[in-house]
Amino acid sequence: MATCPPYPTHPTGPAGGALRHAHWWQKRWVRYGALSTLLALSGLVILALVREQTGTEGFLVGLGLAVLPVPLLVAAFRWLDRVEPGPWRNLLFSFAWGACAAALIAIVANSFATRWIATATADPSHADTLGATVIAPIVEETAKAAAVLLVFLFRRQDFTGIVDGVVIAGVTATGFAFTENILYLGTAFGTDQLSGDSGIASVTAATFFVRVIMSPFAHPLFTVLTGIGFGIAALSGPRQHLRRVLLPVSGLLLAMGMHATWNGSSALGEYGFFAVYVAFMVPAFGLLTWLVIWTRQRELRTVREELPAYVAAGWLTPGEPFALGSMRARRVARQYARRHGGRAAAREVAQYEAYATSLAFLRHRGRRGRAGADFAVRERELLHELWGRRAFARPALNAAQAWPAYGYPAPVQWQPYGPGHGPMYGHGPMYGQGPMHGQGPLYGPTAPYPVYNPYRT
């Protein structure tokens, strides 16, 4: 069996500090149990409240219509997260929080606040307008932001930048909009049942057109601003405490402001609503979409720039940083592995790509002085995850590099290498021989961080 190459030098010096002993309330099973119980209870209560307001038939109609945009929105956010895909459990938690806990908080708080304003002012119509434009944005965005905060605090290793914040916030808001749409569509259906209206001119059809066809991205768009604030905070250094607090708060305030503007447009009449939609919502959606895609491209550039340090140490082959820094090459590698090795091989390649991306981001944070005390532990974990999957991943990535679209000959024949075997293992100056492996000034205890940047002249 091949011996693992040496570890590259820590960019900010040796990691220090032992892991603290966790109290019983900090144990993982306690957290998962408490959250699961909270979400289950919230789901049961919200189910009863919505069914009480819409009736059984209205609830079923609302559920059938409200679920239509959910797969598209979740798939869109998952696509944005393809560079370093987070675990599905984070997305499931976010959706469940938005659909159950946040929706329950919003229904209870909004109803209480609206009734209190109506009683205090003796003007129910004014209370409804004030509740929709002021109270609802504050309550709903705060409730949705709680999910982003929880992932940021307790799943910190999965929350490393802007894209992670956007995905968690967007999926949370998708869950919230799902429950809210059930309520609105079910209520509209009940109104049509009482009035005898049906067809394209019904209240249900109008509600479906506005909420599901025109603006399925409305709630995700608001909450994404909060996610961006948390994402930028995740990129901040550990000593930048004020910035790590102010940025999420600023994002939350922007989300509340955009939400209030959207809700307030309904009071401007039919043309006012469409004016706000065209002049404000659509450009904001386009701008945020561009920002997220640009951020994703920057993440790929980080992969290409940081991973060559592990090529020098022998953990990666010379072409892997460039293949791993291209979404097209990654896809070709997974397809090649699936075609020649089956689903298990494709899954190994996908995991290899994800771990390599996490390693590049970890290295990037460390080089900028933003890595935590567990840098060395986390680096070793990621490197060993890569080492254990190299038998299937490297041939697939080599094939991706050799694909004709990249200017090379056709892919080589599939041949999963055994540990330490094959043309890429155990031979030459890059693999266990020469000054790059445990010898010379680059890898001593006080060695500087060796960085190879392919874009630097």
Image (spheres, rainbow, N blue to C red):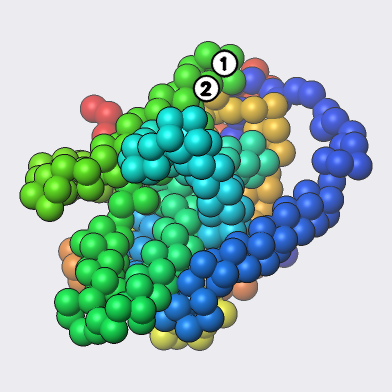
Residue 115: x %, y % from top left: 51, 42
- Name the quarter where the N terminus is drawn: bottom right
In-front residue for pair 187/279: 187
Q: Where is 57 relative to 348, above or below?
A: below
Q: Is residue 428 visible?
A: no
What residue do we see at 37% from left, 51% from top?
A: 220
* Element under disc 2: helix
What residue do we see at 22% from left, 69% from top?
A: 206
In-front residue for pair 251/335: 251
Q: Where is 234 relative to 259, above or below?
A: above
Q: Is residue 233 visible?
A: yes
What residue do we see at 70% from left, 63% from top?
A: 40
Residue 219: mark = none
In-front residue for pair 89/343: 89
| Occupied quadrant, residue 136 | top left
What residue do we see at 30% from left, 56% from top?
A: 217
Looking at the picture, which amino acid does disc 2 mark? Arg
Residue 440: x %, y % from top left: 59, 27
Task: Locate residue 191 relative to residue 341 in the image: left or right.
Answer: left
Residue 79: x %, y % from top left: 36, 61
- Name the quarter where the C terminus is drawn: top left
Task: Locate residue 172 relative to residue 335 in the image: left or right.
Answer: right
Task: Locate residue 345 relative to residue 40 in the image: left or right.
Answer: left
Looking at the picture, which amino acid does disc 1 mark? His
Query: Cα distance, mark 1 to mark 2?
Result: 5 Å
In-front residue for pair 250/64: 64
Q: Are marks 1 and 2 in contact (CB under 8 Å)?
A: yes
Count neighbours of disc 2 (C-alpha within 10 A) and say few if under 14, some if 14 to 19, many if 20 or more: many
Residue 241: mark = 1
Residue 110: x %, y % from top left: 50, 44
Residue position marked by numbered label 2 in the rendering: 244
